[in-house]
Amino acid sequence: MAIIYNESAKTITLQTKNTTYQMKIGNLDYLLHLYYGSSVPDIDMSYQIKQYDRGFSGNPYESRNARTFSLDAQPQEFSTQQQGDFRTTSIEVVNSDGSYSYHGKTAGYKITSGKYQLDTLPCVFARDTDTVSSLEVTLCDGASDVQVVLLYSVFEEADIITRAVKVVNRGTGSIQLKKIMSVCLDFLNGSGFDLVSLPGRYGQERQVERQPMTHHIHNIGSVRGSSSHQQNPFVILCDREATEDHGRCYGFSLMYSGNFLTEVELDQYDQLRLVMGIGPKQFVYQLAPGETFEGPEVVMAFSEHGLTGLSHLYHDFYRTNLCRSKFVSEVERPVLINSWEAAFMDFDDVKLVKIAKAAKNMGVDLLVMDDGWFGKRDDDNSGLGDWYVNKDKIRCGLHKLVEQINALDMKFGIWFEPEMVSEDSDLYRAHPEWAMQIPGRHAVRSRNQIALDMSRREVQDYVIEKVNGILDDANIYYVKWDINRSLADIWSNALPAEKQGEVYHRYVLGLYRVMDEIILTHPDILFEGCSGGGGRYDPAMLHYYPQYWVSDNNHPIDRLKLHYGTSFVYPTCTMGAHISDSGKFVSLETKAVVAMCGTFGYELDATHLSKEEQEICKEQSDRFRKYQHITFKGDFYRLTDPFKVGNMTAWQHVTKDKDESLLSVVVTNLTCNGPQEYIRAKGLDPGAMYSINGSKETYSGAALMSAGLPIDREVPEYSAFQFHLVRERCTV
Ligand code: DGJ
């Protein structure tokens, strides 16, 4: 068992293959955090804690005159409220008597084999081949009888520990939960950490920022109702000296798609605390006696092998333990063509069939009919919510259209934006009360659409019925599920005034129910998530969708940064990437090399391509299929940082057995008469010899990694290279 309780030391130790995590039921039954990092044997790590009389830092009443025990200086497993710890809290609760206080003390623990489950929220899962055990530690506040249950699962081989939290009101009156964090991690020696996060904006999601921790609370989160373009629910804490290959790195990835918060506080004693969970903006959750609240899961990983080591842990784990879709591992992803940048909403059935026919010559497997096929939808001012086929555009009907595409030996995909309604729609006219808007006020406009109140059961049922109706009516292979605004006007007509503080979270819960009912009931359909590009790219969404649209920005040079940032936590097989007309001065080849760092497809009017261009695309589609086992299943290496000044951006995929690798380079800048550039490979077998792109000559893995590959510099700007390395087998 990877979870050990030591009776005499009162420590609970969680062991994975290469990491150790330890807590202790300490003085006065407070649950202390002792360690997370590289493996250490199961010894009591509390020797690290030194007690001092810390002026102005309170002591629990029960410690009487012993002034050296202050929660303000203790490393805690779950920081609580009004206990003399003035650092950031993990819980804020208003008790039934109106008091703001939570004094959680350890009341029990339970160790079980297998993975814990949450009833209301998506979680990672254990496969039959995984060794997983779980721990539940219960904290109780003696005065209010409110329990906090801390949940842990340990994935031994994967070096992953997950955490989640439950709050159980066992008292006699209702309480209000105002903040509940799923994870709290205290570091006794917190100096010298950097925080890496993935901020962005529409069209530029998941850019990378790294900042040294200073003495204040760093707050990273979203208040937009979704995990957002602007921040991602993922952060890394790493040694200031950490590089791609060296140094300690801790990752925290939150399985939640709504408002979230990460706070990192470097305190007065250079201790560091990180908390992460649901964002507390307008969050007031009522818990009646007997009720339980669940907080989302955080997937934690630690690597002492730098940022790449950490990314590999997440890539491997998210490829196998996050999404059960058969498209994750059993079925190859299709090369698709999407109608959006080809036609926007200006299409009909005839035009779509023409695009499909041209795309067939390009080796494309799947035509996706994007926005514009339903209700009254000639622009984005109307029609959302009316999920029936627009007969003026799809004159032959959906069934016949799909048949025509299938007759080309191609598959058919369709777009939905199920969470939204247009004021100019039949749905809104019939049910204005289903739209999220505050009575007596006008709703905030955003792309002229309003969010449906997904917290309402009847709204969820409507969406399930309509979307399932379409999916069951025709031979649909793929669905793109979009959402194109941030939430505002948070209000539900179905809830009383005192429960309006629950709407943000209930929206997310309603969405997960709808996705359970639509996505999990259609295991043969490939789902791709989208939010005006990559605005809700989070692990909870990837629990449902094997792939997610990275960004509406298809410019291949911007994409270098987009893919680079996304790769810190999400594997290549999740990254929706297409070739479009964007990037006028960039060749089709460079666009293809960039899009192969993703799920690959086209987003242009194929009928406008010449025969030669279609043939080029055909070769690219075949190449993507040929390399898919390397890019989707291999280890990913960031060879250069596109945010730093340099002339090339390079990355590499290497199969697990190191037999094959795809090394990709884009020349982003050409200096006149500049020096020869070399790209050093990673992850190869140093003792093996590799051929490159089928060449007769072979090169040793050691040389390719130490001396590097010279990159031809006498090339046009924005040229790209793709080096397919294959291990030479000795033939006797
Ligand atoms: C935003 C998406 O990111 C685009 O790809 C496209 O589907 C549009 N929405 C359609 O409205």
Image (cartoon, grey):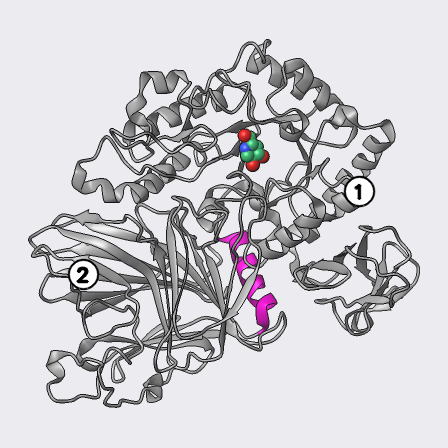
Q: Is residue 13 left or right of residue 229?
A: left
Residue 147 numbered mark, or none: 2
**Residue 27 appears in view:** yes
Q: Residue most toward the right?
A: 696
Do residues under tags 2 and 1 come within 8 Å of each other at their CB atoms? no
Q: Is residue 444 above or below residue 395?
A: below
**Residue toward you, 671 or 274:** 671
**x and y percentages locating residue 131 in the rendered image:** 44, 63
Can you say which quadrant of the picture contains the C terminus? bottom right
Name the kind of residue labelled 1 in the image.
Answer: Phe
| Separation (CA) of disc 2 from disc 1 | 61 Å
**Dot 1 corresponds to which residue?**
585
Q: Tell me if residue 315 is in the magenta stretch.
A: yes
First of labels 2, 1 by sequence position = 2
Tell me if mark 2 has few (under 14), some (14-19) or many (20+) residues whose alpha carbon lies within 10 angstroms of its own: many
Task: Please give the name of the residue rendered at 47% of the width and 74% of the height, measured from the top-left corner.
Answer: 19
Instruction: Point out the frontmost of discs 2 and 1.
Output: 1
**Residue toward you, 215 or 176:** 215
**x and y percentages locating residue 638 in the rendered image:** 67, 62
Q: Is residue 616 left or right of residue 38?
A: right
**x and y percentages locating residue 108 in the rendered image:** 20, 68
Q: What range is drawn magenta here? A: 305-321
Can you say which quadrant of the picture contains the N terminus? bottom left
Name the kind of residue labelled 2 in the image.
Answer: Gln
**x and y percentages locating residue 176 in the rendered image:** 17, 52
Tell me if mark 1 has few (under 14), some (14-19) or many (20+) residues whose alpha carbon lies within 10 angstroms of its own: few
